[in-house]
Amino acid sequence: MKQPLELTGLISNLHTFFRSNLTPFWATVIEGALVLIAVLAAYAIIALALIYIERKITAFFQSRLGPNRLGKYGWIQSVADLIKILIKEIIHINKVDKVLFYAAPFFVIVSSVLTFGIIPFGQGLQAVDFNIGIVYILAVSSIGIIGVLLAGWSSNNKYSMIGAMRSGAQFISYELSAGFALMTVVVLSGTMQVSEIVESQRYAWNVFNGHIPAMIAFVIYLISGHAETNRGPFDLPEAEGELTAGYHTEYSGLQFGFFYLAEYLNMFIIAAIATTVFLGGWMPIQVQGWDGFNQVMWYIPSYVWFFAKTGVLIFFSLWVRWSFPRLRIDLLLNLEWKYLLPINLVNIIVMVVVVLLGWTLEDLFPIFRP
Amino acid sequence: MSNIQDIILNAVPEALIEEKQKLTVTVEPKQLHPLVKALYENKDLPFDYLISLIGMDWEDKLGVIYLFSSSKDMSQEIAVITATEDRENPLLYSITDMYEAAHLNEREVYAMLGIRFINNPDMRRFLLDGDWNGYPLCKDYDADPTLNPITIANKEITDLAPRIMEDENGNLVESVANIFDEDDYIINIGPQHPSTHGVMHFRTALNGEVVKKIDVNSGYIHRGIEKMCETMTYPQILHLTDRLDYLSAGMNRHALCMCIEKAAEIEVPMRAEYIRVIMDELNRISSHLLAWAAHCNDLGATTAFVYGVREREHVLDIFDKTCGGRLIINQNVVGGVMFDIYPDFQKDVKAFIPYMREKLVEYDDFFSHNPIALNRMVNVGNMSREDAITYAVTGPAGRGSGFSCDVRIHKPYSLYEKVEFKEVIRTEGDSYARYMNRLDEIEQSLHIIEQLIDDIPEGEILAKVKPIIRLPEGQYYQSVEAGKGEFAVFIESKGDKFPYRVKFRSPSLAAVSVMPLICKDELLTDFIGIGGSMDYVIPDIDR
């Protein structure tokens, strides 16, 4: 297959260039630094783009215009906001627990960046690829809640405290569902390595391959992932109508910016993981035997496929956010513990049965087998 | 009425009964409580609804005018007057054992006139700070700013309530009670909070996230409008009514205009009446739309908020073209209206009616049946009919509890006798009933406008009024149905060009006073939602 716009060639050229000119140690160091810079740059740029996109889409939902003054269609607005938040004064609060207060935003942002690193943006565009990738995702994304709890606790503010406690209850509950939904896919694809999960979906995306249980897991993952990002209708921890801003009420300047950035990126990360695990990741749509068609699909580079699929999921998340009123804490926990979790537990067993009896699409129809 | 006179004379033989604009009964302080009790317990026509409690300073005496009405027949009203000559330590008997609405009103009278009420369990000052020097509504009040300097120092809030109780032997015992328990977890909701709809301060004791007790503090934007009125001529006062409940500005002003017109016997031209009623109903639609939008926003549906404001914009545009004002429409004046309608007025209003109907359907599709919204509103913040009456909650909120209290029906004014419309009543008493009531009332308002818009008569818009209006000596009352409930104006005149005393009844005060009751044992989240469903406006309370 010809893939003229892929970046794999560029990456391997760079790799051979460093290997042939430097000692292995320095080559590794420089490559590591480059990857780090690339990841952080992608992190910042995606956040800026998301903020702009969200503001525009929200505006259309709400019959408004959204940003439209800076640049054509207001596209420089997010950049201006970024500069503003970078140079804003950090207001020091007197009666906070200093160490915890200043550490909290870093927990949140570090957790978010670590999860970001494992996302395969395209062919060969993945910073880390463990053989236990799924476990890694679950592990590092859970660090964020520590930051939120610390922020609420150390702020010495009753509103922040209530927000953080709500967040703790919500995050821990929905983490269960998200974890089980991902495990359902692990059962289906038989591996935890993210790159292999993508590879196994060449002709049949997991959501179709595992049909009924996979679709249930997909929906549950979207719901619980959405809840984990603390966005409406699950935005109780920072319900601005009740708790002013919840756990980050007392933060200002760049520290607030970290929370803000992490929230946006988490929305992207959830959508990206759902894409990778359920919707074939960066893999183009391909049909076995239709070589011409497949060639055309491969002309579209893999990272475009990835961002397109992720974009659709992000749009869904925005749609939900701007349509529903906020849930109450008891309704929220009911939804998780009385509905999602039991369904999930049954679902994972159903998936095991489907896989063992050979009822997946790949088993039933050879055309879907890679 | 003779029947009522018998009841009054039976209870208090010495009572002085006068047939003025309202049936007025004057009694000694000692006899007030028995008289009110007799009226309250009257079987056929219980006077169980306290419209307003008006503190008065007659210079030789300090007293209170109580205006009662009946939940069975709102058109029956009775004014009870009592006064004490003791200006040093004025004491009257409280009626809080019968009327919950009296709690905050009596506290306000204490702050403004220094009258303390025996047997009121919480005799802190309302609207003013506890350490305020002087009583502003007294005629001998010294307004020297050095007496009450503006300070930026941090003031601790004391949760101690002084009280004077009468024991079995009739002795007065002064004591101090704690409002909260010692280990209560108290958070301040307000004065700066996005969901209190103004600078309202709720001291809230929480048990986990469950509301245990609420203490209402207000007065952060108290402007002393009633005091200002006493030094202004009648046409000048008109502008102050707009600053009470700014969302019902036009309706508030209509009440004051009617009160003055009745007292001065000014005939309003028919064309002006039509314009007034149409503008009132448009005003009500805009008020209800904002209430709906803000309620949805309190429940976390930001998009619904934008939708409500979007439709309200059309109403405001019509106001803008008619009289230049959008929120505060300076339209009503004594004797008629200030501006005639513009040539396309009828066309614009007629275009708005079907547009609004279409959007009401959209609201229904988008929000009213959303499962989360239903969970957040149905069976939340229950207020029984009895509670609504005793707390004097009127308007869509009171009618959500089955309290038939539409002033337009029971005490029709202006053109409301001529038009046909339904009083929207629901009996569930929860947030959802109040929510739906507002949407249904928008429909009824559209229906009223429809009946009037085509036959606005030609003619004058303003009757001939003397430049300086003097009202004959007496007491004058007028109620209208404002956006939040019954808005009443009371004027006492001594025949001067300034009023002797003006009192505005605030429907929002009643809505706030019932909050501690209906929010008890609800979650903090629902407290905000219930507040949205009660739809209060704070400047209306902080007069």
Image (cartoon, helix red, strand yellow):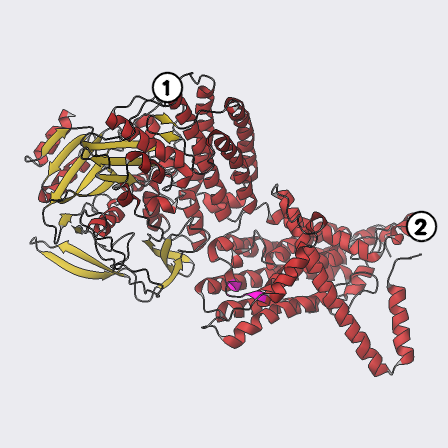
User: The residue tagged with tag 2: helix, strand or loop?
Assistant: helix
Q: Residue at x 86, y 68 (%)?
A: A11
Q: Position of residue A57 (x, y in %)?
A: 66, 47
Out of B278 and A19, give the one closest to the viewer.
B278
Query: Could you say which disc has been placed on residue A291 in the image?
Result: 2
> Does the segment drawn in magenta span residue B365?
no
Q: On the picture, is B333 further left or further right than A191? A: left
Mark 1 on the same chain as mark 2: no
Locate residue B141 relative to residue B456 in the image: left or right.
left
**Left/right of residue A5 with respect to residue B116 in the rendered view:** right
Please state the horizontal and vertical placement of residue B383, each as a whole percent of the image.
35, 43
Chain of the residue under the numbered disc 1 shown in the image: B
Tag 1 and tag 2, C-beta contact below 8 Å? no
| Residue range highlighted in magenta | A247-253
Q: Nearer the viewer, mark 1 or mark 2?
A: 1
Q: Residue at x 92, y 78 (%)?
A: A20
| Res A341 seen here | yes
Query: What kind of residue is marked 2?
Result: Asp
Residue to which mark 1 is pinned:
B270
Quadrant where the C terminus of chain B sits is: top left
